[in-house]
Amino acid sequence: MKANHPTDMLPAFALGCLDPDENSQVLEHLRYCASCRAELQALEEVSVHLAYAVPFVEPSETVKKNLLATCSSQRSFAWVEKLFNRWPRLVPITAIASCVLAVVFATSSLLLLKNVNLTQSVTVADLQLVPLQGAEAMPQAIGQLVVDAASGQGRLLVNALQPLAETLQYQLWLIRDGQRSSGGVFSVSQNGTADVLISSAWPLAHYDSVGITIEPYGGSPSPTGQKVLGGKMLL
Amino acid sequence: MFFSRQFLITVFLGTFDRGHKFAKKMLDDNGLVEQMASGDEQALEILYERYKGLIYSLMLQILGDHGQAEEVTQDTFARIWRQASGYRTSRATVKTWLVSIARNRAIDVLRKRRSRVDENSAMWADGVLETLPAKGTPEQNVEESDMRRRVRTAISQLPEEQRSVLTLAYFEGLSHSKIAERLQQPLGTVKGRVRIAMRTLQGKFREGF
Ligand SMILES: [Zn+2]
């Protein structure tokens, strides 16, 4: 069934220049076609090689200094990371699910805070929680943003997302007034879970909603694939 | 005592630290990302030194502005740092991962800005003129400048009409239909040129690398 493979579109896909409808067509095909995924991987290498063809310039030393400073400061956020790295192991999946369900039915977020307190015996007064719900494509998926009110930084926890083919990743979109910026890309474990530190230029309260879509590995400049999870911020 | 205790400890730790860093420099990209996943900032620094020129040069070509290019370069490595634990070696090389994150971010910035800061449009380096990266091991430098030379030669050998669609797609992130509009060419022609250019380069890189 060679005729059904979007072979002609793969070079443009690797370059990121397909128009949206063709792009989603290819994305959909890649989900189940291993031979096109292998083909794409080779073409992506071509796209990376092109980066060697521009005039060579070195960045100033400030970039490195700022980079290392930023990354060190992110380690001070490590306690939240530790807590939530432990979380999936400490709390049975059903408990996580019930927390999220509680949000759906709760009239205030207070109830959720209580629930989390019950299951975790930690203080979460400074953390704000945003429930995410599975979209039509993956109704079983659930997720939650955990936002540190003081720093405006946050983590994304997801569960029951379908593991994707190796050429694809999930991408988080932070949305304000219809403008979408990437909050990071991630893959999920075999169980469909992931725990991701969100990249954001602004404190998360700046955004009004979030969404997660399926994108080519490494992510896209703007959403191109199917939406699988979404939620309103209300921070 | 001849040396103070504090002095000896400092010297010991200094040697220890340098020794470690030296050993880490021997790590390949995957090894560095693994170290980064466990919070090792030195590994990040080494990876940054390895690819800062590649990423920054590309950002500067796409954005045409030093400040923004530096910002996106920094942001790209910061993302790699944050996402190191989610990296899977089976999928893409670290280099592919870096370049795709950087290019996506830059094109995103470009789209939001709608136009480049300077008036010169992005371009490929001259196939003959060579600017050598200054640092890194000698082998790395030879390998890298060889790579630059081959890629530039391959691109300069493409017919002009293929090179121009490639430029608009790669540096400006334009889609097929936007390129067709810009160049006032039929959509099918543009699609064909992108496809042939990429396949030609693929063939050449496969022979040469
Ligand atoms: Zn296929």
Image: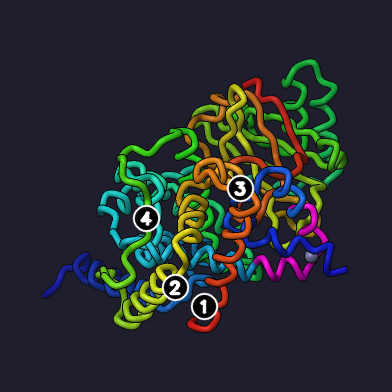
Identify the residue under disc 2: B154
Which stretch is magenta? A27-40
Can residue A184 be seen in the rendering of this structure? yes
Check if mark 4's residue and mark 2's residue have beta carbons within 8 Å. no
**Mark 3: which secondary structure?**
loop
Identify the residue under disc 4: B123
Q: Say whether disc 4 or disc 2 marks the residue closer to the N-terminus.
A: 4
Can residue A198 be seen in the rendering of this structure? no
State how far apart marks 2 and 3 are (Cα).
26 Å
Check if mark 1's residue and mark 2's residue have beta carbons within 8 Å. yes
Position of residue A198 relative to residue A112, above or below, is below
Q: Residue reaching furthest top? A: A107
User: A211 or A191: which is nearer to us?
Assistant: A211
The residue positioned 43% from the left and 33% from the top of the image is B113
The residue positioned 56% from the left and 36% from the top of the image is A181
Position of residue A184 relative to residue B113, above or below, is below
Instruction: Give amino acid for label 3.
Output: Pro
State how far apart marks 1 and 2 are (Cα).
7 Å
The residue positioned 33% from the left and 37% from the top of the image is B117
Instruction: Say which quarter of the image contains residue A98.
Output: top right
User: A181 or A144: which is nearer to us?
Assistant: A181
**Mark 4: which secondary structure?**
loop
Crowding at label 4, few (<14), some or many (≥20) Cα neighbours within 10 Å? Answer: some
Tag in front: 1 or 3:
3
State how far apart marks 4 and 3 are (Cα).
23 Å
Q: Most prominent secondary structure in the magenta stretch?
A: helix
Residue B174 in the image: x percent, y percent?
Answer: 54, 45
Tag in front: 4 or 3:
3
Identify the residue under disc 1: B204
